[in-house]
């Protein structure tokens, strides 16, 4: 089987790790959001690509989910002392990755090739594909104006009210040409933030069309359980956008694209409402605290997708 797993951020990477444990490298390809990318301190930062790379390499910070677990912070401490900009924290080891990415991009590699070189050097055997090599930049529309994503998310800690999102550059971005649409058996939408992790991927022309033409099950795993997001600002965003912060609210957002929906056990009563949207449903434990949880959910998702 060949599964295309759409992912972005920490929540998505948890299921991605489970999928990578359950499926060999030929059977799953990860398609990653790059709408969070930006340039900081002159370095090209691709947070969701790096979160997945570190997670699959077994290097991710268990606490934060992003960055490395074995990190030190001498660079940031020194930069702070020198009066530099430190709201976006790059650890010493992470800094090396960013300098290497800048070097690869400067030598003419695209983001896909740079990602492959870095992932391979860190021992990752599964394929990680940025959604596009062209720049797509998520912008958050707030009452105070438009904010670049990381300024909203990290610098302003998601405090401003989100009125909407725009994916600058998406309309002209070319989808990653290595996405194996021709041999797919299923697509999985990981439990990432639907608005700022998954929607930017779906905004790249040709991705939704090709998935629908492939005529394969498109399985989404709910990122909202019992009215709360497992991680991050998904539920807050839903409330601000006037969408019920529930698993049904997420399913409604994906209706017309997703064909199968994984609901958490605590929301089992929502099954009829999700089915009414034209999706098949299954109930599973979607909260992933341990590696065993990730593997068990990945197994359930793969079974459901068959
Ligand atoms: N998230 C934070 O909340 N604070 C940070 O300082 C921060 C630094 C950072 C550095 C590299 C990287 O790959 C990710 C980093 N993140 C940080 C996470 C990241 O910006 C967000 O989690 C994602 O963009 C949302 O998916």
Image (tube, rainbow, N blue to C red):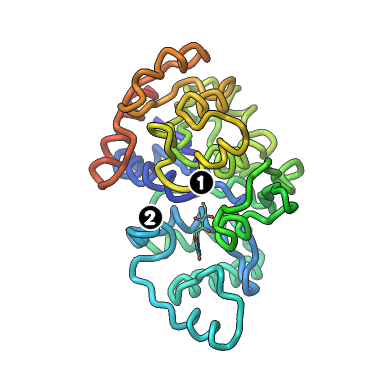
From this viewpoint, which residue is outermost toward the left? 292
Residue 73, x across and y down, in percent: 43, 78
Left or right of 102: which side holds 273? left
Residue 294, x across and y down, in percent: 30, 41
Q: Is mark 2 on a helix, strand or loop?
A: helix
Residue 242, x across and y down, in percent: 61, 32
**For residue 65, which quarter of the picture?**
bottom left
Residue 105's label in the rendered image is none
Residue 29, x across and y down, in percent: 46, 41
State how many labels appear: 2
Whether disc 2's CB lies below 8 Å from ligand 1 is answered no
- The residue at the point 48 percent across, 29 percent down is 184
Question: Which is more toward the observer, 159 or 137?
Answer: 159
Q: Is mark 1 on a helix, strand or loop?
A: loop
Q: Residue under circle 1?
A: 233
Residue 55's label in the rendered image is 2
């Amino acid at each position: 089987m060949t599964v295309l797993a759409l992912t972005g951020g920490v929540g998505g990477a948890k299921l991605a790790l489970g999928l990578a444990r359950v499926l060999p490298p030929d059977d799953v390809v990860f398609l990653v959001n790059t709408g969070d990318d930006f340039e900081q301190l002159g370095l090209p930062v691709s947070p969701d690509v790096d979160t997945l790379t570190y997670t699959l390499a077994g290097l991710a910070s268990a606490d934060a989910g992003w960055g490395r677990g074995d990190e030190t912070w001498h660079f940031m401490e020194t930069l702070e002392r020198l009066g530099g900009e430190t709201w976006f924290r790059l650890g010493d080891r992470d800094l090396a990755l960013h300098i290497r990415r800048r070097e690869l991009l400067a030598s003419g590699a695209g983001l896909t090739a740079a990602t492959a070189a870095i992932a391979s050097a860190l021992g990752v055997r599964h394929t990680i594909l940025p959604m596009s090599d062209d720049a797509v930049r998520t912008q958050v529309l707030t009452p105070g104006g438009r904010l670049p994503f990381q300024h909203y998310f990290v610098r302003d800690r998601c405090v401003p009210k989100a009125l909407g999102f725009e994916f600058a550059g998406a309309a002209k971005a070319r989808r990653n040409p290595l996405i194996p649409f021709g041999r797919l058996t299923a697509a999985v939408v990981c439990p990432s933030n639907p608005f700022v992790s998954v929607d930017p991927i779906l905004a790249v022309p040709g991705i939704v069309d090709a998935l629908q033409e492939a005529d394969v099950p498109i399985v989404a795993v709910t990122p909202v359980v019992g009215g709360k997001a497992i991680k991050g600002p998904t539920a807050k965003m839903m409330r601000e956008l006037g969408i019920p912060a529930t698993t049904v609210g997420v399913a409604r957002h994906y209706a017309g694209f997703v064909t199968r929906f994984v609901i958490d056990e605590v929301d089992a009563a929502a099954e009829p409402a999700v089915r009414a949207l034209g999706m098949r449903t299954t109930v599973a434990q979607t909260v992933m605290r341990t590696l065993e949880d990730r593997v068990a959910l990945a197994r359930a998702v793969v079974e459901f997708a068959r």
